[in-house]
Image (cartoon, rainbow, N blue to C red):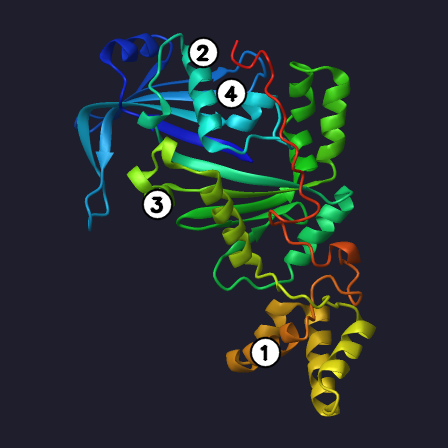
Amino acid sequence: MLDTITLTTEALEAAHYAIIEEQLQLRTGVQMATGEEKYARYVATMAVPATGAHLRFTIDTAKWIKKPGEKQPYRVPGIKSLRIEGSIHKAMHGHNVYGGPVEPQEAIAWLVALAASMLSCPLPDIEQWYVRRLDVAESFDLGSLDNVRGWIRAKSLVVYPRRIVHFWGDNGFITEGTTTTLRAYAKGIQFHAEGGYKALLQCRDAGYAFEVARIADRVLRCEVEIKPPLLEKLPEEGRADKITRDWLERVYDGGWRKLLRPIDRDTRMVHTAVEVEKRLRDCLPDDDRRVLSLYMVWCTLAVRGEAWYRRHVDGRTWRKQRRELEAASISWESTNVLTIDCPGSLQHFFPGLAADQRLTTVLPLLERSTA
């Protein structure tokens, strides 16, 4: 599903800029010591008539360009651009719990048409718009809020060598990178904290709002925020009409696979004390000494977590042990040794596009969305 997006264009005519500027607020930045104007832009946040979701409109009166090898961009005055920022999902449906758009070009064209209606000004076709941020999100029904929190707690026991991961207790986590930022969180907690139920009551009936809130309480939401360095590598440097659903799905799945490193095997993974011992003996039938050694490694991982264990063994030893455990389809996440584990049915859950728990419904647009 597509959610938060930032679009920019320089293709407006002077008369169109004048129409839009009258509806925005002028903000300037001045260097007090010299009186030099550092920036000037027109900004306003407007509510979508049908859903109450907010879109932010900005007209920049200059362009900032960074040359290769230079750290600081320089300002080129006189080059105007219009920027639209907001959640396509919320603008369409009044919430982003599930059912958002999946076809990028259709969704972007819809958003541009909505913006033109709100601004009472014609806007260019999507061929003249560039995407500077796009969030791809998926919602997974894990059955209850406790299950969602349990899955998040299990992820806190894992070491992530390529990323710094920040956890918000058992409510969610985030990891920021140069090209993408990944988030996973309990949607119900965020939905209620931000007044999602009350917002829905303004545009939909109470029954619908209650149903969305009920679903939100069971949902794990996983997002990949795609940033300019990755978008600019696309054809035409991220032009809106060049972005495809297939590419977005590859970025989403690839990002989560790289972070969570799921073990894709036909053999069922085991994670309980009795099952792990049996699996090791099946895989190493003539080596009781190695079975006991790996079993003790697994017990340590289950009790203290991967981060603690890796601080006490050298890297070569850990890599060998990890390969052997993974080859036997043995997991040390959410084991029955710990009291903070998530349900066994979610032990092998991976928030990918093929997950059974993924909510695949695509909601129809509200008839009043472009009013």
Instruction: Using the numbered discs, state the Cα–Cα distance from disc 4 to disc 3 in whole angstroms.
Output: 26 Å
Instruction: Mark 1 vs mark 4: give the one in front.
Output: 4
Q: Do the numbered discs 1 and 4 sit on residues whose CB atoms are within 8 Å?
A: no
Mark 3 secondary-structure assignment: helix
Q: Which mark is residue 312?
A: 1
Instruction: Using the numbered discs, state the Cα–Cα distance from disc 1 to disc 4 in whole angstroms.
Output: 50 Å
Q: Out of 168 and 368, give the one closest to the viewer.
A: 368
Instruction: Mark 1 vs mark 2: give the one in front.
Output: 2
Q: Which mark is residue 118?
A: 2
Instruction: Using the numbered discs, state the Cα–Cα distance from disc 1 to disc 2 in whole angstroms.
Output: 60 Å
Report the amino acid beneath label 2: Met
Residue 146, x across and y down, in percent:
77, 46
Image vertical order of residue 325 relative to residue 23, above or below: below
Report the amino acid beneath label 3: Pro
Instruction: Using the numbered discs, state the Cα–Cα distance from disc 2 to disc 3 in whole angstroms.
Output: 30 Å
Q: Earlier in the sequence, mark 1 or mark 3?
A: 3
Q: Do the numbered discs 1 and 2 sit on residues whose CB atoms are within 8 Å?
A: no
Image vertical order of residue 233 relative to residue 105, above or below: below
* Disc 4 packing (10 Å; few <14; some 14–19; many ≥20): some
Is residue 312 toward the left or the right of residue 145 in the image?
left
Q: Earlier in the sequence, mark 4 or mark 3?
A: 4
Q: Do the numbered discs 4 and 3 sit on residues whose CB atoms are within 8 Å?
A: no
In the rendered view of the protein, which quadrant contains the N terminus? top right
What residue is rendered at 23% in x and 30% in y? 63
Image vertical order of residue 178 relative to residue 273, above or below: above
* Disc 2 packing (10 Å; few <14; some 14–19; many ≥20): some
Mark 2 secondary-structure assignment: helix
In the rendered image, which quarter is residue 332 located in?
A: bottom right
